[in-house]
Structure formats: C-alpha cells, structure tokens
Amino acid sequence: MTAITFLVIGGLLSGCSGGEERADSRKRGQCETLLGDENVEAAVKTTGGSDVEVGGTPQADVLAERLVREAKQWQESDLQHTSYTGCRVDAFEGDGISGTVDASVKWSALSLGMMDSPKNSRTWRQANESVYVETEAGPGRSRLIARCAVPGTIDSQPSDLPLQFDVSGTSLGTELRWELLSVFARSVVDEMACTKPPVIPSTMPTSA
C-alpha cells in the first residue's frame, strides 16, 4: 500500500472522528439548552466520568410536535403511550459506564383524578392545580405530571391524558434531579401551545 493511500485513509478516519465529535458537541449544547447548562454540567460531574456520549432528541419544539400529534390521535381506550427521550448522557471512565442521566417525556397513563387516591397521595405532591410531582418515583428517579389541554383533542384529554416528565440518574441528588426536571418540563411546555399552560414551579414542592 502506498504512502499516499495511507494518507488518504488516515484523513478519512480523522474526518469521521471529527464529525462525530462535532455532532456530539452540538447535541450536548442542545441538551444544555433543554435542561439548563449549569444543571447538565453538575449532572455530568456527579457521574465521575471523564468522557460523555449524548443521545436523544434534545429539541423542545421537536418533542412538542410529536406529543401534540399523538394527543390529537388519542382515544380513551389507548393505554400505551410513546416515551420520547429528550436527553440521555452516558458518562465513561476507562472502559466502563460510570453513570447515566436520562430525561424523557410522554403522555401519562395516570390521570389527574388518580392523584387523590390514598396510594398516590402518599407519594405525589401537588404543586398547583395542574402540576403534581413525585420526587422519589424510584431509585434515582423523579417524575412530574402536568395538565396540558391540546387544541383539537377529545374533551377528556386535559384531565385523563396529562404530560409526564421523568429524570433519572442514580448519581444525582434529589435537588439536582428536580432542577433538571423542572427546566426540562418548562422547556417542552413552552413549545406545546397548551390552552392553559401549566405553571412549572421553580422550587420543589415540599408538602404531600
């Protein structure tokens, strides 16, 4: 193989690597816009990883468009809803994953009427008339549901099909998970054109 051939292959490999790095850097920047730049930086730091890979669809307008389209097709008999990953950050240290931070949104299988049940009232906190928060929905997971009436949907959609936002990461503390969750929810809701937009609080609800 000639020296020129080596140079060409080397240039192609270098170009591919650079393209991947630029794409990953751009997506991380979009994640920082979606979840808050300081929040993402703090979340990555908790994982202890020196390298990160970013995935998902970190664009609030794209997520909102998909959610609106799904809501307009929804019927009360539909119990399965698509979950959309807004941002997933995998942190690596050496050859292994040191931590993962994931933010996703979907239409919830829980209705707002379920929040008053004895079981749910023990874990869900009402932030206001249209938002409920579960700060410990599972190990390293926080969840928020919000009423969002989408124009062009059936009458029961606002109460029976609220938005559900999840943020998970075992390395994250409750406060940081909340910061990521609230900014994420606010970013998407701002693009949803809800008839009466839910108010996503900036501070975590403290009373059940």
Image (cartoon, rainbow, N blue to C red):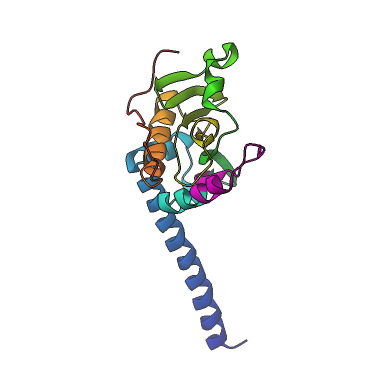
Residue 194: image x %, image y %?
40, 41
Q: Is residue 63 left or right of 119 when viewed as pictured?
A: left
Nearer to me, 5 or 123: 123
Residue 52 visible in the current orientation? no
Residue 161: image x %, image y %?
54, 35
Nearer to me, 86 or 23: 86
Which residue is drawn at the image coordinates 40% and 25% (left, top)? 175
- Report if residue 183 lies within the magenta region: no
Identify the magenta region.
67-91
Residue 131 visible in the current orientation? yes
Considering the image in quadrants, where does the N terminus appear?
A: bottom right
Which residue is drawn at the image coordinates 47% and 49% (left, top)? 63
Which residue is drawn at the image coordinates 52% and 22% (left, top)? 136
Please state the total of marks drawn on the protein image.
Answer: 0
Q: Is residue 98 left or right of 129 when viewed as pictured?
A: right
Q: Quadrant of residue 109?
A: top right
- Report if residue 77 lies within the magenta region: yes
Which residue is drawn at the image coordinates 59% and 14% (left, top)? 119
Residue 184: image x %, image y %?
41, 39
Above/below status of 176 relative to 150: above
Q: Quadrant of residue 139?
A: top right
Considering the image in quadrants, where does the C terminus appear?
A: top left
Residue 42: image x %, image y %?
38, 36
Q: Quadrant of residue 2?
A: bottom right
